[in-house]
Image (cartoon, grey):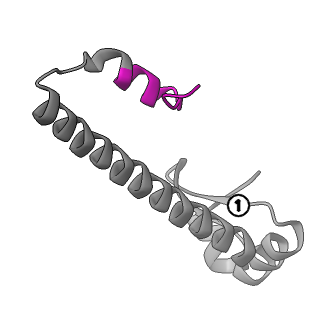
């Protein structure tokens, strides 16, 4: 991955942009020898954005599923008067296992 300082970006922005688009490799922009930004091509950025949206959707779906499980457990507890130990259930949910696995 190429690293350029802010001064080089100011003087050679066309060449740097051209390189990023052609190679699809990010360029690290340094200020006082520390990374302050990354310059990436538009396709890579859109893929990252899409992945974040999918991740957010998955997280929301998992939360909704967990909330439904808690509601069902509350109903079962109310009807039967028995409460199952939740330790194993939580452990299984964290590992991505369902009750039937």
Q: Position of residue 28 (x, y in %)?
A: 64, 57
Q: Is residue 14 left or right of residue 80?
A: right
* Residue 95 is one of the magenta-drawn residues: yes
Using the rendered view, name the quadrant where residue 38 is placed: bottom right
Residue drawn where x is 79% and y is 70% of the image? 20
Using the rendered view, name the quadrant where residue 79 is placed: top left
Q: Position of residue 54 (x, y in %)?
A: 56, 62
Q: Is residue 50 left or right of residue 27?
A: left
**Please, is residue 96 above or below residue 27 in the view?**
above
Which residue is identified by label 1?
A: 27
Which quarter of the figure is the C terminus placed in?
top right
Residue drawn where x is 38% and y is 49% of the image? 65
Magenta-drawn segment: 89-101
Disc 1 secondary structure class:
strand
**Please, is residue 72 above or below residue 21 in the view?**
above
* Residue 69 is one of the magenta-drawn residues: no
Residue drawn where x is 81% and y is 76% of the image? 21
Q: Residue furthest right?
A: 22
Q: Is residue 18 left or right of residue 56?
A: right
Residue drawn where x is 80% and y is 78% of the image? 15
Q: Position of residue 17 (x, y in %)?
A: 75, 78
């Amino acid at each position: 991955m190429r690293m350029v300082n802010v001064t080089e970006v100011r003087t050679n922005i066309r060449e740097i942009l051209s390189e990023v688009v052609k190679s699809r490799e990010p360029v690290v922009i340094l200020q006082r020898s520390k990374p302050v930004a990354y310059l990436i091509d538009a396709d890579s950025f859109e893929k990252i954005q899409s992945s974040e949206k999918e991740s957010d959707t998955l997280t929301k779906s998992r939360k909704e599923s967990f909330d439904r499980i808690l509601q069902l457990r509350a109903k079962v507890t109310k009807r039967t008067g028995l409460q199952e130990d939740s330790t194993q259930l939580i452990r299984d949910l964290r590992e991505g296992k369902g009750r039937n696995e």
